[in-house]
């Protein structure tokens, strides 16, 4: 079963924690467990990059989550030009490590050009459990069926 959800965010620093919450809440709702920390870091890095470098003033970015079987794909879409590239950071640099972190944590990573803009995406292999009727939300009594 293919699951998909998208949300737009303004070009603002407050969008980073909002995107993290959206991603983690969505994955919990869908039953994806086990890679929350990796997804949290990667969403933070990709959204921060879009806010700082990829979104022209006055425009928005979007976070897209796609779940299919044991895979979760996160995409950050923006309307800016250019193609992000991982670079070597010098020890004293305050930044420049974000894409390296994403590449290290994700099972796959890439950039898809659009006109205008691009999607920067990461894929994670994880367990997915289907939530049956009667789940009381996070922390409640839950019966789960594993799907692969």
Image (cartoon, rainbow, N blue to C red):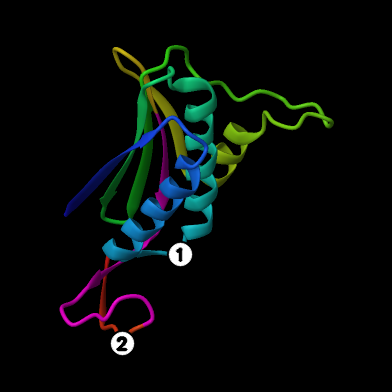
Task: Name above or below for residue 2 compared with residue 36.
Answer: above
Horizontal relation, residue 136 to residue 108: left or right: left
Horizontal relation, residue 46 to residue 8: left or right: right
Indicate the position of residue 44 as horizontal and vertical percent values.
52, 43
Indicate the position of residue 65 as horizontal and vertical percent values.
31, 45
Q: Tell how many labels.
A: 2
Task: Name above or below for residue 15 compared with residue 59.
Answer: below
Tag on residue 34? 1
Foreground pick, 48 / 145: 48
Q: Is residue 129 magenta?
A: yes
Which residue lies at the image location 56% right of the left edge and 21% below the top edge? Answer: 85
The crowd level at tag 1 (other Cα within 10 Å; few <14, some 14-19, many 20+) is few
Q: Is residue 26 magenta?
A: no
Indicate the position of residue 8 as horizontal and vertical percent values.
31, 37
Give the magenta part as a residue range.
Answer: 120-139
Residue under label 2: 141
Q: Secondary structure at mark 1?
A: loop
């Amino acid at each position: 079963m293919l699951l998909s959800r998208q949300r737009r965010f303004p070009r603002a620093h407050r969008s980073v924690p909002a995107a993290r919450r959206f991603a983690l809440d969505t994955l919990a709702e869908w039953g994806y467990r086990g890679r929350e920390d990796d997804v949290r870091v990667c969403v933070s890095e990709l959204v921060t990059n879009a806010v700082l470098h990829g979104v022209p003033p006055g425009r928005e970015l979007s976070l897209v989550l796609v779940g299919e079987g044991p895979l979760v794909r996160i995409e950050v879409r923006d309307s800016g030009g250019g193609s992000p590239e991982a670079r070597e950071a010098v020890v004293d640099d305050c930044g420049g490590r974000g894409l390296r972190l994403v590449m290290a944590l994700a099972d796959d990573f890439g950039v898809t050009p659009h006109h205008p803009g691009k999607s920067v995406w990461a894929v994670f292999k994880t367990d997915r459990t289907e939530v049956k009727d009667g789940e009381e939300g996070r922390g409640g009594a839950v019966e789960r069926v594993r799907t692969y």
